[in-house]
Image (tube, rainbow, N blue to C red):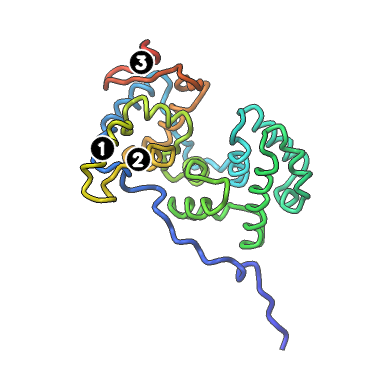
Amino acid sequence: RTPVLPTAASRKRPRPAAVASGAAESPFPGFSRPTKEDVIRLHTVLAKHFGARHPKPNSRPRRQILDTVVGTILSQNTTNTNSHRAFQQLKKAFGTWDVVRTAKPAAVQAAIKCGGLAPKKTKWIQHILRTVYKEHGKTSLEYLRKESKEGVHAELERFEGIGKKTSAIINLFDVRHPDMAVDTHVFRYAVQLGWVPTDAARAAHNPRAQGAADRWPVVTRDTVYKHLDATFPDRLKYSMHLLLTDTVGGLPVHCGAANMLSFDGRVVKVDGKLL
């Protein structure tokens, strides 16, 4: 008998168990802010100034999911200008992700050198490309468009270099699942608005906690993501993310101590001045 060779489909790994990355519950049980009303009121004020943001209905995806994933990896620990330049140079040098997958690491590093950490980023990118090709028979992540919100998190976060922010960005903009992506700016604003516990509040709460599940973890981007994703209304996640991060048409998001944000339920102030 002629042996039956394994196909690309038969080589696929078992699907990962979905994890609760799009958290249904806050990691800060009993912490009352923000309420959904807080979020709605802040969105109403920001939308009045900058306009609410909505995805175009039935619009076709503007980019491949791999473009977003690679672009997000290249954006780590560098400026937007340098990361965009690195992405463009990578696409210009190799043309397709298949070519990047099979290229010599030194050649990929040379193309993305301007973005910093080229050896590490090259290793991460090529590992993702090779793994996806091995499992699916093609260098593409478009299959994620059929995944659940939790499935997108589980599939992507198994890769080194990809965290909850990247997964949430893919969900929000490419797959169109409501997911409150938390970048540096959203994290900073959440802290300034008092929407996550302070160190003092944690220190006071944890000794009184009834068990490990009731203790409040350290405030990090990941715990803030879980908290905001659990408390923000789904219908506002897309618009709120853009209003809080858009450097051109939204809140000013210059890094550093400047641009302190406050909101009393009626008016927004930036550095003490009315918006």
Position in image of residue 156 (x %, y %): 53, 51
The residue that appears at 38% across and 14% down in the rendered structure is 275
Residue 249 appears anywhere in the view: no
- Front residue of 20 and 191: 191
Quadrant where the N terminus sits is bottom right
The residue that appears at 31% across and 21% down in the rendered structure is 263
Labels 2 and 1 touching (C-beta < 8 A): yes
Q: Which mark is residue 31?
A: 1
What SS does tag 3 mark? strand
Residue 7 appears anywhere in the view: yes
Position in image of residue 183 (x %, y %): 48, 34
- Count residues near mark 2 (Cα–Cα under 10 Å), then give few for <14, some for 14-19, many for 20+: many
Q: Is residue 5 left or right of residue 224?
A: right
Going by the numbered disc 3, the residue's amino acid type is Lys
- Count residues near mark 1 (Cα–Cα under 10 Å), then give few for <14, some for 14-19, many for 20+: some
Identify the residue position indicated by label 3 in the image. Answer: 269
Q: CA distance from mark 2 to mark 1?
A: 10 Å
Labels 2 and 3 touching (C-beta < 8 A): no
Q: Quadrant of residue 133?
A: bottom right
The label nearer to you, 3 versus 1, is: 1
Position in image of residue 49 (x %, y %): 40, 18
Q: CA distance from mark 3 to mark 1?
A: 24 Å
The label nearer to you, 2 versus 3, is: 2
Going by the numbered disc 2, the residue's amino acid type is His
- Is the residue 165 above or below the residue 256 in the image? below
Identify the residue position indicated by label 2 in the image. Answer: 227
Labels 3 and 1 touching (C-beta < 8 A): no
